[in-house]
Amino acid sequence: MADDVFDLTHFPAHIGLGARVERLERFDGTPDWYMRYGRAHADDGLEGRLVSMHRFESAWDSWEMHPQGSEVVICTPGAMTLVQEIEGREVKTRLTLGHYAINPPGTWHTADVDGSASAVFITAGMGTQTRPRS
């Protein structure tokens, strides 16, 4: 692999002020990773975006919400159902290869997965909150 080609599942990217793009440290999935990311890019404020790719083998076990901006969810291989809480009800949107949905700011969301699926996320992560899925 060329020195300037990276695997998005292992090395997310940050899009910051001035349309600058930076390859991030290896993703380990821990809350500490997200805390380090947030501290390192705090100066980009509301304009900063985390670009990541994740593979899922089962439904998510939590909800999340991004209060400061929209998130784009792009399904790559597989199929998933994005579940959003909108006006007190669950809205389900099925995504397959190449389809995308938008999580508006402040919208709680989770996902169900059919077998396995991968998705690319472009996230305004400042202030992200999570809660368990019951």
Image (tube, grey):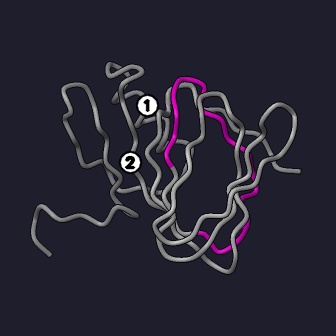
Q: Is residue 12 magenta?
A: no
Give the Cα separation between the discs numbered 2 and 1.
13 Å
Q: Horizontal placement of 129 versus 100: left or right?
A: right
Taking depth in this image into account, of 62 and 86 the one nearest to the observer is 86
| Residue located at (71% from left, 71% from top) | 58
Q: Secondary structure at mark 1?
A: helix
Q: Mark 2: few, some, or many residues within 10 Å (few <14, many ≥20)?
A: many
Query: Horizontal and vertical percent for residue 134?
Result: 89, 51
Disc ID at residue 113: none
Q: Horizontal placement of 52 versus 6: left or right?
A: right
Quadrant for the N terminus, please: bottom left
The answer to which image quadrant residue 2 occupies is bottom left
Q: Mark 1: few, some, or many residues within 10 Å (few <14, many ≥20)?
A: some
Q: How many marks?
A: 2
Q: Is residue 65 magenta?
A: yes
- Residue designated by label 2: 51
Q: CB under 8 Å between callouts 2 and 1?
A: no
In magenta, the rendered stretch is 56-72
Taking depth in this image into account, of 99 and 4 the one nearest to the observer is 99
